[in-house]
Image (cartoon, rainbow, N blue to C red):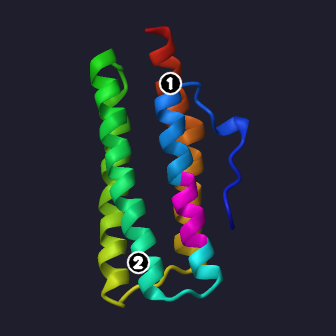
Amino acid sequence: MGLIEWSAALETGDARIDEQHRTLVKAFNDLEDALARRRGREAASRTLLFLVGYATEHFQMEEKLMDDAGFPDAARHKRFHHDLVVKLSALLTSYTQGSATLNPDVMGFLEGWLVEHILGEDQRLAQFLRAH
């Protein structure tokens, strides 16, 4: 676990999606950095709040692209988005209230989800968008 390095492998080829993915990766890295440098719960909470809000906006944009293009796997992809927003929102609430920590397991989950989602689901979506 650690910082996510942006690479060509993470690019979907869709400028709208890639720009937002870069912002999500930067937000994750900012959160990781805040924790590593022990900047405190308040700094980490602000970064986590931004990450949750921006992820929600990003998912809405992707879902509009899916709907507009008639993406056949939209329902499943949207469920992944919904499930993550629910988990992130619960984590944000617990963390800001002091009842949860952003330990290596939690950060590993977030990192894995972000990278795997980009490499899998979002690559398939971008491929469909290019073809249609």
Q: Is residue 36 left or right of residue 82?
A: right
Q: Secondary structure at mark 2?
A: helix
Task: Assign the C terminus to one quadrant of the image.
Answer: top left
Residue ranking furthest to the top: 132
**Label 1 to label 2, Cα distance in Å?**
32 Å
Q: Which residues are magenta?
A: 25-32
The residue that mark 1 highlights is 126
Q: Is residue 65 left or right of residue 120?
A: left
> Which one is earlier in the sequence, the residue at label 1 or at label 2?
2
Q: Which mark is residue 45?
A: 2
* Residue for point 52% across, 25% down: 14
- Image-quadrant location for residue 73: top left
Mark nearest the camera among 1 and 2 is 2
Q: Position of residue 125 (x, y in %)?
A: 46, 26
Q: Position of residue 47 (x, y in %)?
A: 45, 70
User: Does residue 3 sit above or below 66 in this rendering?
Assistant: below
Q: Position of residue 88 (x, y in %)?
A: 37, 64
* Residue for point 33% across, 53% down: 83
* Residue for point 59% across, 25% down: 13
Does the magenta-highlighted stretch encompass residue 39? no
Amino acid on which disc 2 is placed: Ser
User: Does residue 65 sit above or below 120 in this rendering?
Assistant: above
Q: Main secondary structure of the magenta part?
A: helix
